[in-house]
Image (cartoon, rainbow, N blue to C red):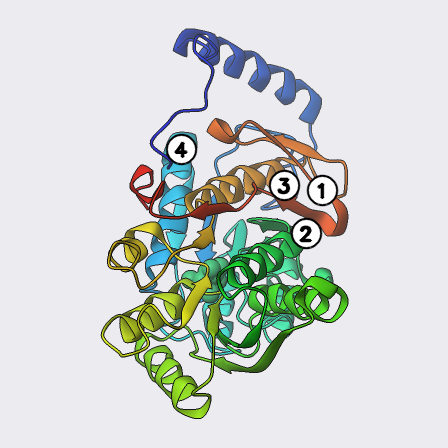
Amino acid sequence: MKLSNHTPRGSAPSARKILVTAIAATAALGLLAGCAGTSSGGGSGDANKKISIAFVPKQLNNPYTDVELGGGEKAAKATGDTYSVVGPNTASASSQVSYINTLTQKHTDVIAIAANDPNAVCSALNQAKAGGAKIITFDSDTAKSCRSLFINQVVAKDVGLVELKQMAEQINYEGDIAILSATANATNQNAWIKYMKDELASNSKYSKIKLVTTVYGNDDDTTSFQAAQGLLQSYPNLKGIISPTTVGIAATARYLSTSSYKGKVVLTGLGLPNQMRKYVKDGTVKEFALWDPSKIGTATVYAAKALVAGTITGKEGDSFKAGELGTLKVGADNTVIVGPPTEFTSANIDDYDF
Ligand code: RAM
């Protein structure tokens, strides 16, 4: 959603060409499929088969989730597939289970889930799979055995390293810092935090930085705001807070912006440019990072279609066409990486609208 278009001029195929190609592909695949049958989710080989895909985000009513799912909805409209969203209002470990069970009963072709816990949803997902559904994780993974594919926004290590780098530069590589995360079980945040801790322990340029604590705002605005307040009460010498969650960083910025810590305590992490803009402009925050969440939704829809069609199984080396994102490749751990992180500062934040 950056306000520039990376599609090279003249590269878009004409509508007629697409139509002709689509008809030809359908005919060819129809011949290939023969009498193979078209059981739900079974991989009929028909790349044009319309599917039903249900997204189960970590929680509803999270602005980040809204952008992510917006990409999925747009892609499903373009492909003519049936798109739906169901999910809990809180991001607690097992809050998604009942929604998965309902989707299983409805014989949804693909369940795409951003897991609140790597294991708590697995038995429900395995039942869905036994009923014929394909399982994709996006944003936040489950244990590998519970899904065919993980659509990951960015290489996890890169996320951890960029957040730490932005903090270190602003505190001159010295002092106490804390992490204000989402939920204690979140697979994505825990992976990023692990890489931050590894780097703090192993990279000598960070030897004077001490991570004093990690606290959790549960991706709830009020809880995160209070957690930020509590951190500064408990650690008055804190130099900085890293918040690897869009909910956490926005709530912490709001707290800092009207407190005596504004401009003194450094805040970095992962934020939506539209939520963070005012805190960058008023000097509360200098730098933060993210990616375009809508691309995750887009990639998930095209991966879902390829899985149902049987053109991919999710193994390393598989690739599939993902509309405006071009061709995406499945890498190690059955994971697709959508793109690199973007760093936002006052110099570029107005170029982004999400
Ligand atoms: C929050 C959620 C989401 C995460 C972003 C960065 O919105 O925890 O899972 O990817 O932050």
Give the Cα distance between marks 3 and 2. 9 Å
Give the Cα distance between marks 4 and 3. 16 Å
Indicate the position of residue 297 as horizontal and vertical percent values: 46, 46
Indicate the position of residue 12 as horizontal and vertical percent values: 45, 13
At x 61% / y 61%, what residue is drawn? 141
* Badge 1: residue crowd in 10 Å (few <14, some 14–19, many ≥20): some
Q: Is mark 2 within 8 Å of ligand 1?
A: no
* Badge 3: residue crowd in 10 Å (few <14, some 14–19, many ≥20): many
Task: Please state if 323 lies on the left or on the right of 201 as rendered.
Answer: left
Q: What element carries label 2?
A: loop
At x 69% / y 37%, what residue is drawn? 312
Evaluate if marks 3 and 2 touch, with contact meaning CB atoms under 8 Å apart.
yes
Q: Which quarter of the figure has residue 224?
A: bottom left
Instruction: Tell me the residue that label 2 is attached to.
Output: 148
Q: Count of labels shown? A: 4
Earlier residue among tags 3 and 2: 2
Q: What element carries label 4?
A: loop
Evaluate if marks 2 and 1 touch, with contact meaning CB atoms under 8 Å apart.
yes
Instruction: Tell me the residue that label 3 is attached to.
Output: 307
Task: Tell me if residue 143 can be seen.
Answer: no
Indicate the position of residue 84 as horizontal and vertical percent values: 38, 52
Give the Cα distance between marks 1 and 4. 22 Å
User: Does 182 appear above or below 309?
Assistant: below
Label 1 sits on what residue type? Answer: Thr
Label 3 sits on what residue type? Answer: Leu
Give the Cα distance between marks 4 and 2. 23 Å
Q: Is mark 1 on a helix, strand or loop?
A: loop
Task: Please state if 335 lies on the left or on the right of 176 as rendered.
Answer: right
Residue found at the very far bottom of the displayed protein: 234
Task: Tell me if residue 135 can be seen.
Answer: yes
